[in-house]
RNA sequence: GCCCCCAUCGUCUAGUGGCCCAGGACACAGCCCUUUCAAGGCUGCGGCGGGGAUUCGAAUUCCCCUGGGGGCACCA
């Protein structure tokens, strides 16, 4: 199959939605997998709702996800322009031609009249459809209506026939064109309708595969008719199941965060989001579940897209994000942790000598417990804030003779170290090992050793491993904390 | 109301007539590891919507029912 060309065609009416992102992803995967082109086309024919700011936001979201396009309004391409608002004259020309060929006609019906018609049809239990009344209109009537000030729309004269959508996901789907009436190609204000602009552009831009949500399946029947009228071979179609919320209704704002940027803010990794999104409706042949984007590119196939819609499950996303966080290279994770700690105000000068030394240790110390990046500050705060006031229960625990012995032991071990010298991870481990051996002789071990130390150092009963604490705090801060703890003893 | 799509554990899914008294993952529960939490490991819980038909044999094919979803605009 030569020249694979796929497109993602969002309307710039908001941020990039989870569902749209998934559509974009599948298109991108097909393009990258088959060595085709991925085209970004902005469908802004609805001037009231479309804004340039939204267009930019969507592009930023796509870039954040790592979905790069080969042609688009910003990068150009051979088939531009890539904003439908800039293609209006093309649509007009095309519509004029259809009019001339008798494949379309002018309709002078007002919105009010159409609304009344629709209600009648609905009441009678029919699929609402345009009657085709204006098809019969005479030149005289036309003059009269024009004189009245009516501005016509241009309707497509839908041929009566059966249409088979050969869908790569759903299989052959048959429609009877009689169920949908002559639909509008050009609105009375002269702008193209969605159905017309989409079809015209997919033809003009030589799109080979249209991959979009299942909600467009009925439209596709119309589009096929239009492709024929336009004298074009229709592209291949793949309608993927849509994403549902937990109540099994189409995913929307009331289900919580639905736009990509919200997930970015919460600290989901773009690779994790991609990983999760692809799993909503696609599965790898070997059952693999965790992938980097490049792996997906080599594994993806339209044939393995499932037919039924999937429910968005935040628990699984969280798990996948954790997997991706743990798979991150040390430097990459360090960078992300540093950013979050700066935002939290814990780190002012990431390049200071001290931070250069401790930040890598902090990052690794909290890595296993972080699900989302938004949890970084919380997990790392023990290193930057004052120790918690020990609870009454903790104080009770510290009061024991054994606890006192343990704390004093570490105190003297640390005191013996050279002042102002950094305690590295290995050294910290050695110190604790030696301490544990000394105390073992006195019959104190396991929990009896480490628990009091953790309480003394952090005031908490959970957190990263102790050697991290000592190493990151360093000699002075550790001694200080131990001394403070001793006052409770 | 009409048209279209879909139907395997709570959720995401594997499964294309015998390999399936259905496999994996998340979640949940228990155990192990561990000073703790987390991570990790192990075990468990849990499903082919119902009814017919085809067949020696159906999760898998066909029909009906039921259920869910989508569409039906001078919105995209």
Image: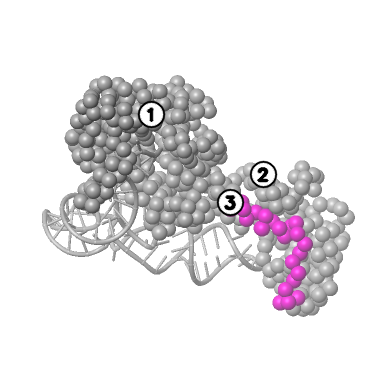
Residue A467 lies, in percent from the top left, at: 73, 59
Residue placed under numbered mark 3 in the picture: A266
Taking the spot 21% from the left edge, 27% from the top edge, the residue there is A138
Which residue: 87% across, 55% down? A418
Residue A402: quarter of image? bottom right
At x 25% / y 42%, what residue is drawn?
A129
Can residue A443 be seen by looking at this rendering? no
Quadrant in the picture for the N terminus of chain A: top left
Dot 3 lies on which element?
helix
The image position of residue A2, as x and y in percent, is 35, 24
For disc 3, the chain is A
Query: Would residue A336 be seen by someone viewing this image from the given angle?
Result: yes
Whole-percent x and y of residue A88?
41, 26
Query: Horizontal and vertical percent for residue A427?
Result: 77, 55
Q: Which residue is mark 2?
A: A335
Left of B29 or right of it: where is A240? left
Which of pointers 1 and 3 lies earlier in the amino acid sequence? 1
Disc 1 target residue = A190
Q: Chain of mark 1?
A: A
Q: Which mark is residue A74?
A: none
Vertical side of A391 occupied by A7: above or below: above
């Amino acid at each position: 199959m030569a020249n694979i060309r796929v497109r993602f065609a969002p309307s710039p009416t908001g941020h990039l939605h989870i569902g749209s992102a998934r559509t974009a992803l599948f298109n991108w995967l097909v393009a990258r997998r088959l060595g085709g082109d991925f085209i970004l086309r902005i469908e802004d024919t609805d001037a009231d709702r479309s804004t340039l700011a939204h267009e930019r936001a969507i592009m930023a979201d796509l870039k954040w996800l790592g979905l790069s396009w080969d042609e688009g309004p910003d990068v150009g391409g051979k088939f531009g322009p890539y904003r439908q608002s800039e293609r209006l004259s093309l649509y007009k020309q095309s519509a004029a031609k259809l009019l001339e060929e008798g494949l379309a006609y002018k309709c002078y019906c007002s919105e009010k009249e159409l609304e009344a018609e629709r209600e009648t049809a609905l009441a009678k239990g029919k699929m609402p459809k345009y009657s085709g009344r204006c098809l019969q209109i005479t030149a005289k009537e036309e003059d009269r209506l024009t004189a009245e000030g009516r501005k016509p729309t241009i309707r497509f004269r839908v041929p009566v026939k059966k249409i088979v959508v050969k869908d790569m996901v759903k299989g052959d789907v048959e429609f009877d064109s009689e169920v949908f009436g002559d639909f509008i190609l050009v609105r009375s204000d002269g702008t193209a309708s969605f159905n017309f602009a989409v079809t015209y552009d997919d033809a003009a831009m030589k799109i080979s595969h249209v991959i979009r949500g299942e909600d467009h399946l009925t439209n596709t029947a119309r589009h096929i008719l239009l492709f024929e009228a336009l004298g074009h071979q229709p592209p291949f179609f793949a309608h993927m199941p849509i994403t549902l919320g937990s109540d099994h209704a189409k995913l929307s704002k009331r289900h919580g965060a639905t736009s990509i940027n919200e997930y970015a803010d919460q600290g989901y990794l773009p690779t994790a989001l991609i990983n999760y999104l692809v799993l909503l409706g696609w599965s790898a042949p070997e059952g693999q579940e965790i992938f980097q984007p490049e792996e997906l590119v080599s594994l993806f196939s339209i044939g393995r897209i499932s037919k039924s819609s999937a429910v968005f499950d935040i628990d699984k996303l969280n798990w996948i994000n954790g997997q991706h966080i743990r798979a991150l290279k040390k430097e990459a994770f360090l960078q992300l942790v540093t950013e979050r700690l700066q935002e939290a105000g814990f780190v002012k000068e990431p390049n200071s000598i001290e931070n250069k030394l401790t930040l890598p240790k902090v990052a690794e110390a909290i890595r296993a417990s972080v699900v989302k990046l938004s949890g970084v500050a919380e997990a790392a705060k023990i290193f930057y804030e004052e120790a918690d006031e020990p609870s009454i229960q903790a104080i009770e625990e510290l009061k024991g003779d054994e606890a006192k012995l343990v704390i004093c032991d570490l105190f003297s071990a640390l005191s013996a170290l050279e002042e102002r010298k950094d305690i590295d991870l290995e050294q910290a481990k050695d110190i604790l090992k030696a301490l544990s051996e000394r105390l073992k002789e006195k019959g104190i071990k396991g929990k009896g050793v480490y628990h009091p130390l953790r309480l003394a150092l952090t005031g908490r009963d959970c957190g990263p491993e102790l050697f991290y604490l000592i190493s990151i705090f360093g000699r002075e801060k550790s001694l200080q904390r131990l001394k403070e703890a001793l006052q409770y003893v």
